[in-house]
Amino acid sequence: MLRILRSIRSKSIKNNKLAQFSLYAIGEVTLVIIGILIAVSLNNSNEARKERAEINKILARVQSDLTNNIYVIGDHYIKYSGKDTVVNNFLDSLNIEQSPNKQDAYLAWQALMRYNSFELQNEGYKALMLKAEYIPDEYSNIVSNLNYLYTQLHGLIDEELETANKKIEDYRVAAGESANWYMDLTYRGQGSDEFLDFLVNDLSFRNMLVTDFYGSGVLDSRSNKFYEYALKTYRKIDEVLSKYDLQSKNKPFFDYEISDYHHLIGDYSNTTTLDTFSLVEYEEILYLTRKADTTRFEIYPLSKKNLAMESTVAYFDVEYENDSLTKGIRFHRGSVNYYYERTAEQ
């Protein structure tokens, strides 16, 4: 093409033909424009690939934060389940008019007064939002979930934790100023008869156990919702990163193989309430179903011995006969604390 244009130019100049020279000029300018457009297009494509690669690296940071947050909330569930059992044992002993011993009373007091706070990480999300204009449209569901997690739920959880800790601190200060037994309990770790009498008969303490203990922290629906959305968003990000071989090489416990939990599948019943539920597998995910209705909830493993349940503030402790034989499951939900025996063959 260039050879033809140059030939036209040369002949035009020799023959003084303006029209043919103009044709050459237009052709040469057109080629230059096309070359520029191609170069710009290639440069834009390269920039887009670079931006996508950077976004994907940031997504890997976001996924790492989500992993940490899932672990943190899950660990808080596990710690809370132990306290939950202690508090229930204490309240049950009061309900049947059986005087609790000082050790049980002390454990109930500690369960309430030592509140385990936690912090959620969001640095990856902040970095991603600084690149918001470069995020591909196909990542919109991921971004929507992240916005919900970090612009709504995160702040609400922090407020809940702050409120819970302030209530406990105010109660601790009030007890220290008014109760003679508080000094011995705090500095010697010993509960006196006066302390035991207070726990058994003081209605404000009992109400605090029932309302504040079960109505704060991870038992609040916001924390449960954060765990649920964080897990789902982790999975979506993992689908993206796997296309670029950027996913984490060390799979966290919640990114499980269903075969690891086949030993839990079966029916469970409570001999007192006659209530029953089943753990089943569906599309390689563990679910809880109830025979009374068709409701199905996804089960989230927190560890080999601890489980949480989707869309409800409930969690489970698994008891084993041995490493592969399930004995039963203890169900925690607010003030409800029931044990379900395994009824099906394993």
Image: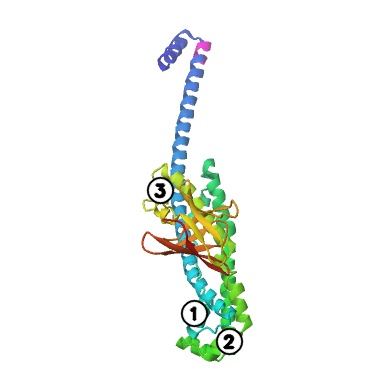
Where, quadrant-wise, is the N terminus in this rendering?
top left
The residue that mark 2 highlights is 198
Residue in front for this viewpoint, 213 or 263: 263
Label 3 or label 1, whichever lies nearer to me, is 1
Helix, strand or loop under label 1: helix
Question: What's the magenta region?
Answer: 18-22
73 lies above or below 207:
above
Q: Position of residue 86 (x, y in %)?
A: 50, 75
In the rendered structure, does residue 266 fall within the stretch colored magenta?
Answer: no
Q: Residue at x 50, y 59 (%)?
A: 268
Q: Is residue 289 visible?
A: yes
Provide residue 141's location: percent of width, then percent of height: 55, 46
Q: N-terminal of the two: label 3 or label 2?
A: 2
Q: Nearer the viewer, residue 286 or 209?
A: 286
The overriding secondary structure of the stretch rendered in magenta is helix
Left or right of residue 148: residue 6: left
Q: Which residue is mark 1?
A: 107
Crowdedness near tag 3: few (<14), some (14–19) or many (≥20) residues, C-alpha within 10 Å: many
Number of the front mark, 3 or 2: 2
Spatial separation of the CA atoms under disc 3 and disc 2: 55 Å
Residue identified by numbered label 3:
247
Q: Earlier in the sequence, mark 1 or mark 2?
A: 1
Mark 2 element type: helix
